[in-house]
């Protein structure tokens, strides 16, 4: 079975064309080698898929006939992704929510208050007397 079809069948990608694009971009590796979408997959192969900043590790147990229901996926693959990959992604999510890129947009009201607190400026600059 082709690697793009296999990843689509076990529901790692929503469409087969998205799986094909991921293979063409080099986000899919089989036994450590970057592969093309037409590469055949066999039971016992180890697949590494880079998706949403996480490197998923999959071991092929068997080849499905067609796309599977979500409950049946574990019969055909073994997920050996280390937990550290998910933890680092979670930390990245926390860091993205608070900080924004420098120079992007105006400061929010909270940012303005933090700046004023830091610089000890008066709240109303008209009252300089």
Image (spheres, grey):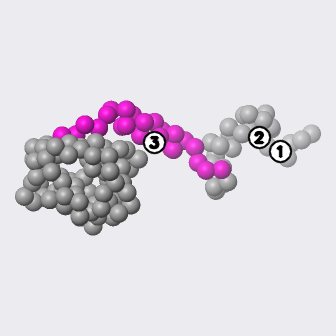
Q: Quadrant of the C terminus?
A: top right
Mark 2 sits on what residue?
123
Instruction: Answer left or right for 106 relative to 57.
Output: right
Mark 3 sits on what residue?
93
Please tell me which of labels 3 and 2 falls first in the chain: 3
Q: Which residues are magenta?
A: 78-102
Query: What secondary structure do most residues of the magenta stretch adopt?
Result: helix
Q: Residue at x 43, y 36 (%)?
A: 88
Percent across and percent down for residue 52 are: 38, 50
Q: Residue at x 47, y 40 (%)?
A: 92
User: Label 1: few (<14), some or many (≥20) within 10 Å?
Assistant: few
Depth check, front residue: 88 or 38: 38
User: Label 3: few (<14), some or many (≥20) within 10 Å?
Assistant: few
Percent across and percent down for residue 44 are: 16, 43
Percent across and percent down for residue 57 are: 28, 42
Mark 1 sits on what residue?
125
Depth check, front residue: 39 or 58: 39
Q: Residue at x 25, y 37 (%)?
A: 80
Q: Is residue 15 visible?
A: no
Instruction: Answer left or right for 87 relative to 15.
Output: right
In this view, 84 is above or below 12:
above
- Where disc 3 sits, the SS reads helix
- Where disc 1 sits, the SS reads loop
Instruction: Answer left or right for 65 relative to 22.
Output: left
């Amino acid at each position: 079975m082709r690697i793009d079809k296999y990843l689509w069948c076990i529901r790692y990608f929503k469409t087969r064309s998205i799986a094909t694009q991921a293979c063409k971009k080099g986000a899919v590796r089989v036994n450590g080698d970057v592969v093309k979408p037409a590469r055949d997959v066999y039971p016992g192969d180890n697949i590494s898929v880079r998706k949403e900043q996480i490197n998923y590790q999959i071991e092929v147990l068997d080849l499905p006939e067609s796309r599977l229901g979500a409950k049946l996926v574990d019969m055909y693959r073994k997920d050996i992704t280390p937990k550290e990959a998910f933890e680092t992604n979670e930390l990245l999510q926390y860091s993205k929510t608070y900080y924004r890129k420098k120079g992007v947009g105006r400061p929010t009201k909270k940012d303005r208050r933090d700046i004023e607190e830091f610089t000890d400026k008066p709240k109303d600059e008209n009252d300089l007397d």
